[in-house]
Image (cartoon, grey):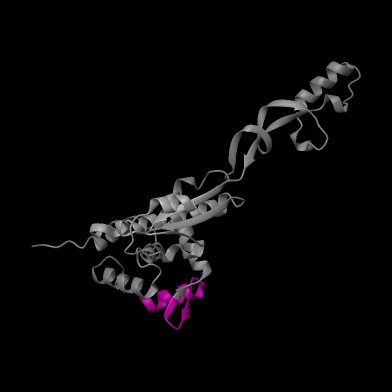
Amino acid sequence: MQWQYTKWDDSFKVLKELSSLFSLFNYLLLQANGDIHEVVQWMKILQQKGFLNPELDFNKFLSQLEEDDLIHSSEDGYELTPKGERRIRQDALMQIFGNLKKSAFGQHHVPIPGEGGENLTETRPYQFGDSITHIDPHATLNNAIRNSGPDNIAIHEEDIEVYEKEHTSACATVLLIDISHSMVLYGEDRITPAKQVALALTELILTRFPKDKLHIVTFGDEAREITIKDLPYLKVGPFHTNTKAGLHLA
């Protein structure tokens, strides 16, 4: 009888897609729930199996991470710093939403006129308080010529036209994460990709939509709100899947 250890098989597939040793370190951190010591042990196994450079010195690797303020020493070993936690979110964002790198700095557009978005084709008469950067010079000049004649052009307030603007709005997002036993049922690792997507979405909202509100809720037997800082350390428990409680809290 042959046994297949799917955790390492999955890691090998991911390894081929990762662009750097640090990306692998971050990915394994999600599997190890933030346990740096366990990650180093896993990386040593990968090195023994020929997937990592045999000359890689893990002491130097950890020293470099510490020098870059990504990890720090503690009584229990190494721990992630706030900068390290942020780098995990950034790395997850690039892995999941890498195709958004060249897009404009995002805002939420809604189909009603307002302030803060792109110019619409429609214009309207100037009102006190409108920004001069919104003035439509062509429509304004046409109004002035029509009202004062081509030989004695004078622009008055009633001639000025301004562009309507798209309205932009802020959103409130609640991210629900299942931490019930079904996330690791039958040896399937569903929690690691779930955390990776959650980290990527969190970083996307924090950087592209900084005025939005973001809440993160985990649910198993019960639902509770957690902080962004807690995301890399989430663990699955022997819980049922109480989706109702999660939706209720959300």
Q: Left or right: 236 with respect to 74?
A: left
Q: Which residues are magenta?
A: 57-78
Mark yes or no: residue 93 visible.
Answer: no
Task: Name the quadrant containing residue 237.
Answer: bottom left
Residue at far left of view: 1
Q: Nearer the viewer, residue 158 or 142?
A: 158
Q: Say if the magenta span includes residue 73.
A: yes
Q: Left or right: 165 with respect to 65?
A: right
Where in the figure is residue 223, as x and y percent of width and height? 44, 58
Establish if 85 lies above or below 76. Answer: above
Q: Nearer the viewer, residue 147 or 76?
A: 76
Establish if 97 lies above or below 51. Answer: above
Residue ID at (38%, 63%): 30
Residue ID at (39%, 51%): 243
Mark yes or no: residue 102 visible.
Answer: yes
Task: Name the quadrant containing residue 154.
Answer: top right
Residue at far bottom of view: 75
Where in the figure is residue 141, as x and y percent of width and height? 81, 23
The quadrant the N terminus occupies is bottom left
Where in the figure is residue 19, as x and y percent of width and height? 39, 58
Where in the figure is residue 44, as x and y percent of width and height? 30, 73
Task: Name the quadrant containing residue 76.
Answer: bottom left
Establish if 248 lies above or below 226. Answer: above
Q: Nearer the viewer, residue 3 or 60?
A: 3
